[in-house]
Image: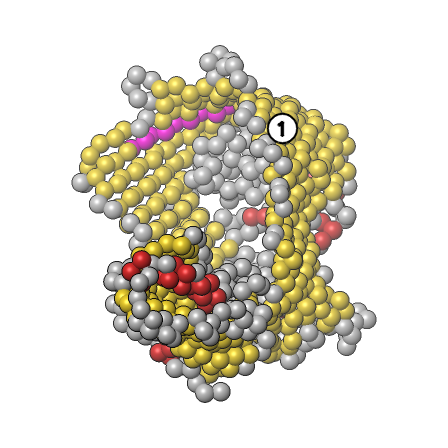
Amino acid sequence: MPPVPETLLQTAPKAAGKPVRRRFLPTCALAAALFWALPAAAQDHPDQGDSPPGASKAAPGSQLISGPIAFEADEVAYAYNDEVVTATGNVVLRRDGQSVRADKVTWNRTTGQIEATGNIRLVDADGNQLFTDKVELTDELKAGAMQNLLLALRDGGRLAAFTGERDASGRLILTRAAFSGCPIEDEDGCPKNPTWQINATRVTYDPDRKSIHFTGARLHIFGVTLMPLPGLTIASDGRPINGLLIPDIEFNASNGAQISDAWYQRLGDNKDLTVTGTVFSKAPPMIAAQYRQLADKGAFQITGYATRSRLISVSGEANPGTAGEVAFRGYLYANGKFQFDPNWSLTGSLRLASDRTFLRRYGISMDDRLRSSFDLERVGDTSYFSISGWATQTMRVGDRQGLVPVALPVIDWRKRLADPVLGGKVELQLNSLAITRTAGQDTQRAFAQAQWNLTRLTPWGQVVSLTALGRGDIYHSDQNDLTTTATYQGLPGWQGRAIAIAAADVMWPLTGQVFGGTQVLTPRFQIVAAPPIRNLAVPNEDARAIDLEDSNLFALNRFPGYDRVEDGLRFTYGVDWQWQGRGIALNGTIGQSVRLSNQVTIVPEGTGLASRTSDIVGRTEVRFRDIVKFTHRYRLDKDNLAVRRNEIDATVGSSRTYVELGYLRLNRDITQVEDLQDREELRLAGRVAFARFWSVFASGIVNLTSQQEDPSSNSDGFQPLRTRLGIAYQDDCIEVAFTWRRDYQTTGDAAKGNSFQVHLALRNLGVR
């Protein structure tokens, strides 16, 4: 078809360039309908009542109202011989929030033809605007014609055409049309070509269905003609509409070249379905579907993937009996939340994969564990109740699924008493947990706890907190010998223990002016006492990954979870420092604890808590406006100040140009506990913006762990895991990105190698 000039999209005033809703009424018919009442009003005008036949009389500044229609014009003339009414000069018709403006409007009473010419602007009740040079309509409104028209949709987008007419059913038929969701003016108000547009030989707008259908459509980006878009239909009111979305193109080492496209199906105002098909050059095709629904009490979604391909185990060998054969493979993911009333809610998620390499091979997820859970909660003003459960599917090489626990049910109830006890607040708690394994230890636990807290501010400004805690536990376990770490096993059968803890905590905030800013220096001291506790008599399910950090330095129990509790007498001291001024914020924490009793500790060596004097832990934070964010967490050996934990997270830059750095090194020399291995890792990411809309981005993860640090590691001290590099263009109507990614490890049929992906998203045309 002949090309549509870019300037056709630029024929409207500036106001039309703003985002507008994609919905409009049959505005041409509206113009004629409003003007239909005009002649009767014009005939009855007193200035024209005495004119002789064949005369033409003007009424400067005429303004008259007939029924609900308001009409304005600089002049109105009636030619009696020709039976033609003519309104000229700033002609305006208004009715029910809709308006028609034109330089000139004529009505031929003999032929019934209504014609508006010159700078025509029709605005419907929804704010959609139609601009054209000329519009013709018959008195029956069965057909009409327009020339050089532009439709600016309120929800965004412009539709322009050389000619247009309305058929007998009321649909608007446009020929040699162009559509774009991009602005056609820059920030200075100068015209510019849209980043993308769709040219079509024919466009049909249906006002009843509020849809726009394209025939012979082709996509143009940056002036280059790209793919055809057969059967393209969009909604004029901004609502989702059934149809194909923009395809994705990718190439990777596992599946070769791949093309995926999705069909979106709107099932109702509150639910929809997206079905995606993907074809590969090196693997059978795959189908995926996502169902979403918003209900009265909540929302949920269900996503599934399915294919058939040759299954290779994580060891890299074909499973016995499956070499050369294909098997079903897939993934199911669902989640949702329901709020039944202000107190009761239900949250749940489900994640299941057919095997350990499916998600990685098809680029769906790099997670090494898939967690499914549910949680029924009641949150009151002074109480909390929860029944929950969770299960985990491991994706990790070397892990046995039979040793992964399933927790069902987990019950937790808490109640804060309204009346103070000895001036302090009392909170009660009941908790139970049942853990099962298909090939490992099973554990059941229940406890009852009461905790009393009192906080007072002294006349000298110290904040003093007193805490008392009492708890009684009951455990039952069997097949304890299947747990490989002896300190986690506990004694089989029924076991019980009692726990009592008392603590006093003092903080003394000191404020003042220094270095042109405000500082707060807060020394802190804490003493905690607990009698001997039967820790090793009960299993350890939730308190394994212990490590002294700044976040748990002053905790009553430095073990995570409930199964292990610190006993004995200890004294903890530290200081917090804050400074703010001139857009800069500095925060620092440092502290250490000393065990005053001679009881044998159960804390493993290397965690920073095994000796009577702990390691030194701290945190430093630096922020400069929104440009610099720096956090450093560390643990120093108490004897030689060797760095046992070194963790850095930093972000420098703006939202468009930035660098992100993450570094972690754990040098704890722990060998007897599998949950506490040493490791070293570097994470880098960044983006550099240039030429206003362009940017280059990159990221990478490098394993720096050596066999000296972790004997079980296969890394040589510098092993890249994943790297990514790409270039992107993004303005207010288009996103285009080309990404290269490299995976450096092969896991089963998730092969290492290069991947290339092209991403395209257009405003007002398909979704991502």
- Give how far across and how far down residue 286 sits, in percent: 68, 70
Please say whether residue 528 is one of the residues in the magenta stretch: yes
Q: Nearer the viewer, residue 257 or 231?
A: 231
Which quarter of the figure has residue 535? top right
**Which residue is drawn at the image coordinates 38% and 41% (left, top)?**
618
The range drawn in magenta is 521-530
Residue 264, visible in the rendered structure: yes
**Which residue is drawn at the image coordinates 74% and 36% (left, top)?**
477
Residue that extends furthest to the right in the rendered view of this protein? 321
Residue 532, visible in the rendered structure: no
- Give how far across and how far down residue 474 sits, in percent: 70, 27
| Left or right position of 569 against 56 | right
Residue that extends furthest to the bottom in the rendered view of this protein? 2
Q: Quick check: 608 above or below 240? A: above
The residue pinned by badge 1 equals: 413
Q: Amino acid at mark 1?
A: Trp
Q: Nearer the viewer, residue 411 or 473?
A: 411
**Which residue is drawn at the image coordinates 63% and 63% (left, top)?**
265
**Which residue is drawn at the image coordinates 34% and 35% (left, top)?**
576
Which quarter of the figure has residue 20? bottom left
Q: Residues within 10 Å of mark 1 (few under 14, many from 20)?
A: some
- Give how far across and how far down residue 209 sits, in percent: 58, 63
Q: Nearer the viewer, residue 456 or 228?
A: 228
* Colour logic: secondary structure
Residue that extends furthest to the top in the rendered view of this protein? 422
Please say whether residue 133 is one of the residues in the magenta stretch: no
- Give how far across and how far down residue 643 sits, in percent: 41, 49
Q: Quick check: 422 above or below 613? A: above
- For mark 1, give the secondary structure: strand
Q: Quick check: 718 above or below 377? A: below
From the image, give the main secondary structure of the stretch colored magenta: strand
Question: Could you tell me how many numbered marks the image carries?
Answer: 1
